[in-house]
Each structure stands twice: as structure tokens, then as C-alpha cells.
Amino acid sequence: MVHTVLARKWRPKKFSDLIGQQTAVTVLNNILQNGRLHHAYLLTGTRGVGKTTIARIIARALNCTNLQLNEPCGVCENCQDIDKGSFVDVIEIDAASNTGVDNIRELIDNAAYAPTLGKYKVYIIDEVHMLSKSAFNAMLKTLEEPPLHAIFVLATTDVQKVPVTILSRCLQLKLRNLLPPEIAAHLAIVLNQENVVFEDTALDIIAHAAHGSMRDALSITDQAIAYTNNKINLNDIKSMLGISDDDFIYNLLDAILEQDSNKLTIVANNIYNHGHDLENVLLKLNQILCNISLVQLGGLQNEKLKQYAGSFSINDVQLYFEITNLGLEQIVKGNNKFQVFVMTLLRMIAFTLGNNTEKQLILNTSSVKTKQTTSSETAISSSMQSPAVTQEIKPVLVTRAPETNQKKEEAAPAPNPAVVANINVEVKSFDGNWIGLIEELENKLDKAIHPVLANAKFNSYNNKQFNITVDNKYESAVNVNIIASISKTFSEHFGYPVTFNLEFSGNVDTTLKEKRYIELAEKQKIAEDAIKNDANLVQIQQLFSATIVPGSIKPVE
Ligand SMILES: [Zn+2]
């Protein structure tokens, strides 16, 4: 028996088969329902979210001879031929592998001729941003005066590289990354149908490793079926994907031992990218720290841990243990587990005895500062009244940072934090206008950092902390130094320390960048319409049979 790969076998054939793209599907259904077709659609989203799949469904829906409730029937000749890729009126082009090839231009020029078999000539152009300039111009010419029978379905992973002139003529449909639970649920359905036994926890790991892409999830599942011989289980999947919690934890310990915050962040990212349960990793780290402490104090014999027991000081291990306890408390509550995870790890470097530069850095960047200063102040002021409370002060909070001690002296005459805050003059409050703020701070922010924030979505602002989602293409670039720089600029702007809580996503909208891009596309459309409706110009065109060079119209700034 020939095994068909799952991604191909389970590729959705109609709109209702699509997972997680309800918005796009509703829009397309309404269009088909009303018969008000657009001539160009632009599907955007990261790889593997279903752009070409949707494009093909659109092509089928437009040419199916037996459309049923806006869904292609899947059995008529047209549907089947489109499926096989042998339908002459559906032209599929992968711009990524055909850039600059002249015949793309010819193909697009041919849009003027009526379809041979179907009702519509459908051009599916994948990774459209890679087209050559001449191909774009040919397409633009067609889009400006589209023949009734020509439909363009464009797809791209990088919408900002699509010329604004094209964008302003497309109906844009954003496809989002799928969430791990959506992927896991779909995998369960597929595997049940395929009669493959599986453990739910194993599917969770696969779903995380797929990074929002159902296609990737299905191809990992293909490997998993082969690897586990039809019994997909957690242990095998972990070893197939090279996941071993313990190895990662020793990598973390090494980075902490080397006081290397960059390395620590990289390992943390790896752990996250491999789809580990961060809470579980933190818990394991906590247990290992406890065991190291036991080895140090002679309560446990363990060869592997012996080297760590000898390298870390007894006090530091106690300290790290406390820090992981605190991290565990926060990670169960927090909806941003990754941020808590990273900050917990960085805190270990920050508060290691005798490491002043990193400590300074972390104290200035993390939300830990405000919390800890406040709690130590509170603890100190209450300890004056009641010595019994002193025992509750965690060693982390009081004994480590000289800054905190300084604060203590300043704060001692006026221990009420609210009073301290009121002394600050020149403070601004955040009015909720994130995009405006990023525009305002554009010149104050480091040139390399501004794009990160221009591509970030504002989620909330609580207790002087900004919670934002950053486009995940910046994920590897964002490190503790960048967060420190951002916090500094914002703190200077507001007149008091503000902190940042970042999460990353492949689907970030409502950003400054997006706002500017949409404005540009609108301006372009207005400029082009103005030129086309200009009576003098129309006359000139008629007199000299002149044409407007595609893409030559530029809006006035
Ligand atoms: Zn059909």
C-alpha cells in the first residue's frame, strides 16, 4: 500500500473543512453568496497556515459546475481537474521559484483572453512579493481594467514587500497562526480516522512544535506514525523531536554558572520552541536545585550533580531555589508564561552575589524591581513595628541589591509608596494611545529598536507595565539589553520607571507599521483615482492614445 502523506490526504477541499480561519471563510462565503466578486484577493499569513489551500478552494468554487451552498462539489470534472492541477484555466505560479522568468509576464498578459473550459481564469500566485517588476506591472495593468473573467488569488508571507499599487486593488484576507490546542484537536480527529493510537500529551508536543502550521503538524505526525509504529506516545515523540527536559535543565544551569545571560536566553528560547511545558521545566529546575543543595550539605550522593554542587556556592543555590519558587508562583497565574520563565532565569544571574553589572541591568528592566522595592519597603517598615514579620522577608529581596538598600534609606522617612510617587513632578500618564506613543518616541528610541515596537501590538497597561505582542520575526533579536533600552526611553518619557512584558506572535495586527502601510495604500488609491478621473488627462489620453505607465502614479506626500 502506498502511503499518502497526511498533509496531502487531509488537505481541506472545501471552506467548511478549514480549521481556524473563520474570518476569511465568512468573507469568502458572503462574496460567493452575493455574487460580488473581487478581481484580486491577497491571502497573507505565515507559512503552512493554508494560503494555497484556500486559493485552490476559491478556484474550485469559481469553476465548479455544481456549486452547493457556495462549496465546490468536489466531484464534477472541473473540481477534479483543478484538484489534479490539470485544469487549463487555473494557473498556479510559485513566484519564489519563478522570479524574473519572462513567461510569468506572458501568462499574466494572457488574462485578457477568455477562459477555455471554465467560467473564470484564476491566477494563483504564491509568494507574490517575489515577482519581478515587469511581472508586477503586467499584473497591475490587468488589475486596473480587469476582464470580467480574470481573478487573481495572491498569497504572501511578507505583505510589506507587495507594492502598494497592487495592495490597494486587493481584498486582503489575513490568515492567522493556529493555536496549539486547535492543532492538537485536529490531529486527534485525523489519527482517529487513520486508526492510529495516540496519547493526548504527545499530540500537545507535536502541536507546539508545529509553530501554528497545520501542514507542519501533519508532517511531524507522519514521521511520528513511522517512528512509533502506529502508537504515538509521549516518550517516543520526545525522543523523536530531540526533547529531553533534563538536558535543557543542565544547559540552563551551565548558563547560570557562566553568568551568561545571552546563552541563558537562547536556551530558554529553545525550550519554548520545542514545545515544553514551561511550568514543568521550572519545577524540574527547582527539584534539581534542591538536590544540588542536598549534595552540598551531604544529604545526597549524586555523581551528575556533584560537579554543580562544587561549582555553585551554597548560598547561591539557596537563592536560586527561592527564585524558582517565586517563578513557579507567578507562572501558574500568569498568562504570559514565557516572559515569567525568562525573567525567572535572568533573575538568577541578576541576583548572584558579586555580579553588579547584570544586577543593575535586570533591576532597571524587569517588573521585579517595582514589586521587590515595594515589598521590601513594606517589609522593612512593618518590621519596624513588628519584628516577627522580618522572617517573612525573602533573602532575595533584602540582602542582594545595594540599590534596594539605598531605596530603604530614602523611603524610611516616608514609607508609604504612594507618597513617594506623588513627589515626582513632570510625570505623564499613558493615555492608551500606543501607536501615537511609538510615533512620538520614534526619534528617542534606538534606530534598531523602533521597528520592533512599530511591529508590536499593545495589549494592556497595568501597574506601569506595558504588555505588548511583538512580531515573532524579532524574537531572536530581542534580548535583555534591548528590553533595558526600551524601558529606559519610556521611563524617561513618563518620568517614572515603566516596565515591559513582551510576548511574540506570528500574527500581530494593530501596529504602527500596519497603520502607516494602510494609510499609504489609501493615499495611493486616492491619487490613482484622481489621475484617472482628471478630465484633462482623459482628453490627453484620447488624443494621443496614451496610457498611464503602471506604478508610475505616486501620492503627493
Ligand atoms: Zn464541482
Image (cartoon, grey):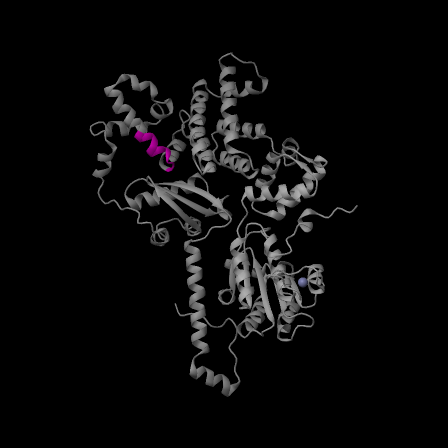
Q: Is residue 498 left or right of residue 89?
A: left
Residue lying furthest right: 1
Classify 51 as above or below 262.
Answer: below
Magenta stretch: give its range: 365-374
Q: Is residue 326 left or right of residue 43?
A: left
Give how far across and how far down residue 248 sits, in percent.
56, 31
Residue lying furthest bottom: 543
Classify 35 as above or below 288.
Answer: below
Give how far across and how far down residue 269 sits, in percent.
52, 38
Give how far across and how far down residue 523 sits, in percent.
42, 67
Residue 37 in view here: no
Q: Which residue lies at the image location 64% right of the left edge and 73% below the top edge?
A: 110
Q: Nearer the viewer, residue 100 or 222?
A: 222
Q: Nearer the viewer, residue 77 or 380?
A: 77
Q: Is residue 365 left or right of residue 18?
A: left
Q: Which residue lies at the image location 37% right of the left edge and 36% below the top edge?
A: 367
